[in-house]
Amino acid sequence: MWDQRYDRPDYLFGTKPADFLVRQADRIPSSSNILCVADGEGRNSVYLAELGHRVTAFDASQVAIAKAHNLAQSKNASVQFKLSGVEDWDWSIQYDAVVAIFIQFAPPKLRQEIFANVMQAVRPGGLLLLHGYAPRQVDYGTGGPAQAEHMYTVDLLAQSFAELELLRLEDYDAEIDEGPGHSGLSGLVDLVGRKTI
Ligand SMILES: C[S@@+](CC[C@H](N)C(=O)[O-])C[C@H]1O[C@@H](n2cnc3c(N)ncnc32)[C@H](O)[C@@H]1O
C-alpha cells in the first residue's frame, strides 16, 4: 500500500523536515548518532544529516527508500537508509536520539510494541522525539489515518513513556504544509523526553 502511495513524481510529505523537528532539533547534541523510524521519503533524516548528525533511517517501503536516497544525494547528505519493517528492525542497537514522526500506521497493540522498542533503542541519557496526530485529526481530514485509535493523546504518551524525563509533552492545533499528504489545520501531539537510566 505504501509503495503505491509513494509512486508519484513529487514527495508525498514534501522534502522539508517536519515543523516539529525543526523546532526541537537544537535539543539534540551535535554529531549525535540518530535513528529515524519509518522515515518515508527521507525529509527528516536528510535534514538531521545536514545538521551534522550521523543518521540511520529505515522504512518498510522500497519506493520511499529509493526517493530518500535521491533526496539525500540532491542535498549532498549522507544517511544510512535501510529497508525494514518495525517488526524486523534490530532494536537492541542504541542511539543518542530516536526520531519517530507520523508513524501512526500502527494500531494500539503494535503501537505499544513499537513504543517499547523505541525506548530500548534510546541509550541511557539519550533522547526520544515523537510527533503525531491527536484523535480529532480524523475530523480535520488534513492527513493521517482514518482511525482515531491510531492517534496519540497526552495521557497515552505520559503513560507509555513514564520512564522518560519529559522535556515537552504538548497537544495543540497548527497549520502545517508538509507535502500533499499532510496539509492544513492539524491536531498534533509532541513528545520529547530524555531516558534517564
Ligand atoms: C505517514 S508516513 C511518515 C513518513 C515519515 N516519517 C515522514 O514524516 O515523512 C508513515 C510511514 O510508515 C511506513 N510504514 C508503514 N508500515 C510500516 C512498518 N510496518 N514498518 C516500518 N515502516 C512502516 C510507511 O512506508 C510510511 O513511510
Image: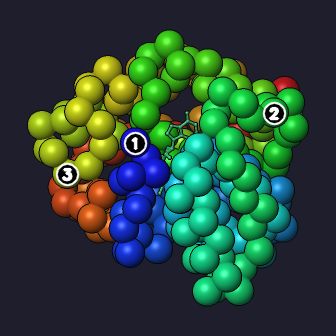
Q: Which residue is mark 2?
A: 90
Marks 2/3: CA–CA distance: 33 Å
Query: Residue at the location (45% across, 62% down)?
Result: 18
Q: Find the distance from the CA under tag 3 to the CA under tag 1.
A: 19 Å
CB of mark 3 near ligand 1 (< 8 Å): no
- Helix, strand or loop at mark 2: loop
Q: Position of residue 54 (x, y in %)?
A: 82, 64
Q: Nearer the viewer, residue 81 or 185?
A: 81
Q: Is 188 placed above or below 175 here?
A: above
Residue type, label 1: Met
Q: Earlier in the sequence, mark 2 or mark 3?
A: 2
Q: Label 3, secondary structure: give it.
A: loop
Which quarter shows the N terminus? top left
Marked residue nearer the N-terminal end (3 or 1): 1
**Which of the marked residues, 2 or 1, is nearer the chain's N terminus?**
1
Residue 119 position (above or below residue 45): above
Q: Which residue is mark 3?
A: 142
Secondary structure under tag 1 reads loop
- As displayed, is residue 128 above or below residue 45? above
**Badge 2: how crowded within 10 Å, few (<14), some, or many (20+)?**
few
Which residue type carries mark 2?
Asp
Q: Quadrant of residue 47?
A: bottom right
The residue positioned farthest toward the top in the image shown: 109
Decide if residue 66 is in sight here.
yes
Of badges 2 and 1, the one in the foreground is 1
Give the camera-side residue of 15 and 165. Answer: 15
Q: Is residue 183 left or right of residue 79?
A: left
The quarter of the displayed image where residue 177 is located: bottom left
